[in-house]
Amino acid sequence: MHGVREELVDLQARSLGYPLEKVWIPYPCPNETYEQQMREVLFRWKAKGVSHVIFGDLFLEDIRKYREEKLAQMDLTPVFPLWGENTAVLAKEMIRIGFRSVVTCVDPKKVDPRYVGRQFDQSLLSELPPEVDACGENGEFHTFVYDGPVFRQPIPIMIGESVLRDGFRFVDVMPSHT
């Protein structure tokens, strides 16, 4: 849904020092297929000693309940460290401490398409209409984080063309190998 190039996700994981396992699903993907693929991956990680799965969900109760139910079937514990945070405060804090990101996708039914390709910064936050969640938690927009205090080095990026696909406005964010 973020519309981010695979190469950028690879660079992000490398800069963060995290292992990355890609889960390939078809498009469109039936929910049964998605769930089966995720089960297989999570069981592999469980066999390696993983007991908890962390999610960045903020307040969507139905999503949390779904994740809790699916993980309970696998005897894994979900963790929601940001749950219930005030998203306006959280967005400002993430910017303040040095996370840098770009808006990669917007739902034009919820937010002006001109935000796609922009830096997720204080200026953008101040322009968002009050009905738009500051973290895009209701699907208004998605971002790609390319720098921050936990990155070993920033990921150099450049912004390419913007396209309308499946009712969403995406921008092509590319690595800039400068």
Image: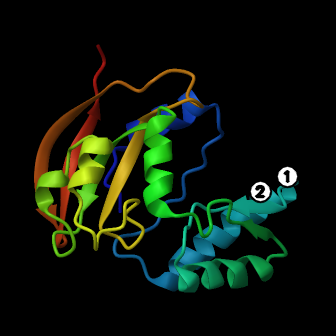
Quadrant of the drawing holding the C terminus: top left
Question: Is residue 120 visible in this depiction of the protein?
Answer: no
Residue located beneath label 1 in the image: 48
Q: Position of residue 164 (x, y in %)?
A: 12, 62
Judging from the image, what secondary structure is the residue with disc 1 in? loop
Residue type beneath disc 2: Trp
Helix, strand or loop under label 2:
helix
Judging by the rendered image, the residue that carries numbered circle 2 is 45
Q: In this view, does 70 lie to the left or right of 147?
A: right
Who's the residue at 25% across and 43% down the image?
123
Q: Residue placed at 52% from the left, 34% from the top?
A: 97
Q: Residues at badges 1 and 2 in contact (C-beta under 8 Å)?
A: yes
| Label 1 to label 2: alpha-carbon separation | 5 Å
Q: Is residue 8 or residue 40 the one in the foreground?
A: 8
Kindly identify the amino acid type of the residue bearing the numbered disc 1.
Lys
Query: In the image, residue 93 lies at what x, y percent?
Result: 50, 45
Q: Which residue is drawn at 27% across and 69% down?
A: 130
Q: Which residue lies furthest to the top in this view?
A: 178
Spot occupied by residue 91 in the image (x, y as percentages of width and height): 44, 51
Colour mode of the rendering: rainbow
Judge whether 22 appears above or below 65 on screen. above
Which percent across, then down, holds residue 158? Answer: 23, 30
Residue 47 in view = yes
| Disc 2: CA contacts within 10 A as few (<14), some (14-19) or many (>=20) | some
User: Splitting the image into 4 quarters, where does residue 17 fall?
Assistant: top right
Left or right? Give the position of 66 relative to 75: left
**Foreground pick, 27 / 106:** 106
